[in-house]
Image (tube, rainbow, N blue to C red):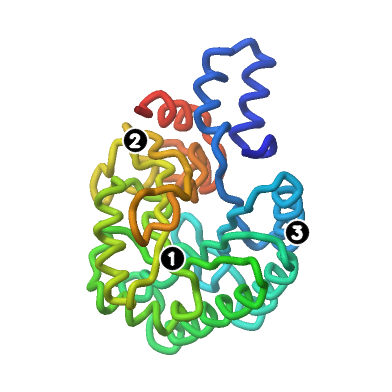
Amino acid sequence: MSDRTNAAQQVGVLRSQGRSAEADTLLRIAAQPSSQWLGEQGAREIADQVSRRATEAGRTAVFVAYDIPHRDCGQYSAGGAPDAASYRSWITGVAEALGDRKAWVVLEPDAVAHTLDSCGVKGDLAAERYGLLAFAVQELKRRPNVRVYLDAGNPGWAQDPEALAAALRKSGIAAADGFAVNVANFYPTDRNAAYGNRLSVALGGKHFVIDTSRSGNGSAGADSWCNPPGRALGEAPTTETGQPGVDAYLWIKNPGESDGQCGRGEPPAGQFWLPYALGLAQAAH
């Protein structure tokens, strides 16, 4: 865990305001390790600082690289690098910052799956994206202690496992350690494991990690991905999953950070939202 996460800082604020019950509830989030997202701003410096602190504490930092051009189909998390050359420079900077420290990197949530749906990039832009992802895997794997997991969507994203496997192969999965499922989504772990296992078979036995940050009450439906009410924290992060092929349960999405301005007065994507965080923690089993 880190005392610098949004949740940890909010615990301090609540304690200073005498709101000790809420602070104790929020500790269910703040006391668990979660990932550090890297976007347009300061990624190299953040990667350096966080991996350095983790190494000094005898831990392994988990990062999410999230800067692919044409990101998120122009939706709530739109943005990313302006072009291919900028992205290559960006990811090389992140890799150099990690150096020989231990780190896990979840690579570009939604980037592969969006090439297969009605929203995402197609044709030459899709080919460019696969090439950029393969380059990113290659750059990160040049570092001796970095593990890389390419994002592979979630069980509610209707797609053919064979088509997804083919897209992942074009994106350099052969050189990666595996893939990630359920990033920033809510599907229960057993369903994610079944989905991941089917994909693993199509990829010759590749391992995978599951985002369990908000999976405690399962999904509210494939269309309910933007701050749906009634969700709960899932299994605590661990590498002891008891499931062959599942390398870890991770809190890849930081619980309590908004999915976006979904039309109900929510803050922008990635901004910490105390009422939602408290709801996730209170509903946890």
Q: Earlier in the sequence, mark 2 or mark 3?
A: 3
In percent of width and height, residue 162 lies at 25, 78
Residue at image mark 3: 48
Q: Between marks 2 and 3, how big is the CA–CA gap?
A: 33 Å
- As displayed, is residue 258 above or below residue 178? above
Q: Are marks 2 and 3 in contact (CB under 8 Å)?
A: no
Residue at image mark 1: 151
Give the farthest residue toward the top: 18
Q: Between marks 3 and 1, how big is the CA–CA gap?
A: 23 Å
Q: Does the rendering let one see residue 236?
A: yes
In percent of width and height, residue 239 lies at 47, 50
Specify the amino acid type for callout 1: Asp
Which residue occupies 31% across, 75% down? 164
Specify the amino acid type for callout 2: Arg
Give the farthest residue toward the bottom: 124
- As displayed, is residue 33 above or below residue 222? above
Looking at the rendered structure, the secondary structure element under dot 1 is: strand
In percent of width and height, residue 74 lies at 46, 64
- As displayed, is residue 74 above or below residue 280? below
Specify the amino acid type for callout 3: Asp
Specify few, some or many for label 1: CA neighbours under 10 Å numbering under 14, 14-19, or 20 or more.
many
Front-most of residues 87 and 199: 199
Specify few, some or many for label 3: CA neighbours under 10 Å numbering under 14, 14-19, or 20 or more.
some
Front-most of residues 108 and 264: 108
